[in-house]
Structures are given as structure tokens and as C-alpha cells.
Amino acid sequence: MITINFLNARWPSLNIMILAAIICMAQSADAGRDPDPNIGRQLYQSYCLVCHGPHGDTKGPLAVKLNLKPENLASAKYQKKSISEMALIIGGYERMAGKKMPIWRRAIPESNIEHIAAYIAQIKSTDLRFIGDPRRGRLIFRNSCVACHGSRGKGTGILAKLIGAPMSDFSNPESVKRYSDKALLMIIRKGKDKFMPGWEGTLNNKEIIDVASYVRSLSK
């Protein structure tokens, strides 16, 4: 948040120039940000899921309601496209023949369109970072895991200290790399060694995937 306390009522044109410069700097900073599929997923769920479905390959509820035939974004046709090519389609610079595709550049910033395009490029991925929701996983982690693993996943939780349980440091990339996605999910589901309990039955399958996705994000 930028607080402007130096504007001079005697020089309104100067004030306008200062404000314009600040806005331009803010826009430039956002424009320079690399497309992020994790941000794109949230945007996709807000704007695209209603037509293209949760995985891009089925009819969403609006498409069913209006009897639309949305493109299969998980098909080879679209998975072969680059992020920039997909962004042009989403933005409406390139039209889908015969399709009632909204021109999204009229409604959302170009940077958000690029984030969505980056997510679509990963929509068939089996990587935990993309099939899980780390935001929901963070809430589950805070409610169920911090007693042992600590609030930042460093393995310094109060319960772990009390019972003398050795814990992995999830913030250390080397510590997390030891486990494949499949192994990490299995540990959360079934438990491991003496102290790690299995959460299957307490958490549903989607919650387990989400919390595993969050654990992966801690080592960034």
C-alpha cells in the first residue's frame, strides 16, 4: 500500500503526473511476472469451469444449461499450444470457429489471462502441485499437522518435541525430494514408522491430495 502525502493542491497537473507514474510502475511490475499455473487454477475455477468443466474436458453447468459445446482443453489440439498461443485464444485475439467464446481481455487483465493459459498447459498433469489445491491444503495442515510438523513444516511442532519424535523439514527441498508424489500420498494415507499416523478415514481423498500439494509448496 502506497501512501501519498506529498501531493500539492497548488499544482494539480503535477499531482496527476505523479499518480500516473505510480500506476504505470505498478502495472509494469505485474506485467513482468511470469505466468503462474497455481494462480491460473483459481482464475480458471472462477471464469472457465462453468463452461469447460473442472478438468477442461467436460461440459460445465452453464454449458449444459445453454446447450453449448465447449472445446476440450485437455485434448492434444490445445495441449500442444504454447502459453502465449493459448493466451491469444482466451483473450479473444484468435477466435474459435463457430464457438461462443467470450473475449476475456474485455473483462480481466492480460496478466490473468496468461496465468489461466499457464494452468491450461498443466491441466492434464498428475503433479501434486496442480492436481491438489495448496490453499485448502494449508488450512488442513494448520488444523491437523502443526502439532508435530510446526506451522511452517520445519518439524518443530510442540507435540513432536514432547514425545521426542524426529520430523522431516518440509521447507528443505532435499528433504521433500526424497519422496515421490505417490510415496508422499501413501505416507499421509497409511502413516509411516513409529510416530506418523495414517489420515485415511479422517481426511477424504481430496483433502489428502490437497494437504500433500501444500507440503510440496513449502520447499519453494
Image (cartoon, helix red, strand yellow):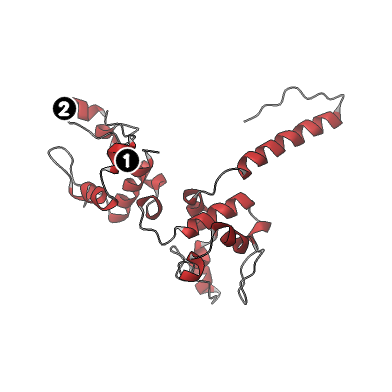
Residue with the mark numbered 2: 164
Residue with the mark numbered 1: 141
Q: Residues within 10 Å of mark 1 (few under 14, many from 20)?
A: many
Q: Which quadrant is the N terminus positioned in? A: top right
Residue located 21% across and 29% down the image: 159
Q: For this view, does 209 lie left or right of residue 29?
A: left
Q: Earlier in the sequence, mark 2 or mark 1?
A: 1
Front-lying residue, 29 or 159: 29
Q: For this view, does 121 lie left or right of residue 137?
A: right
Q: Residues within 10 Å of mark 2 (few under 14, many from 20)?
A: few
Residue 123: quarter of image: bottom left
> Which x, y percent locates residue 40?
51, 52
| Position of 25 relative to 107 (above/below) | above
Three-letter amino acid code at the position of disc 1: Phe
Question: In this rendering, does residue 46 appear at all?
Answer: no
Residue 173: quarter of image: top left
Alpha carbons under labels 2 and 1: distance apart: 20 Å
Question: In this rendering, does residue 215 appear at all?
Answer: yes
Residue located 57% across and 61% down the image: 86
> Which x, y percent locates residue 68?
55, 75
Dot 2: element: loop
> Which x, y percent locates residue 37?
48, 51
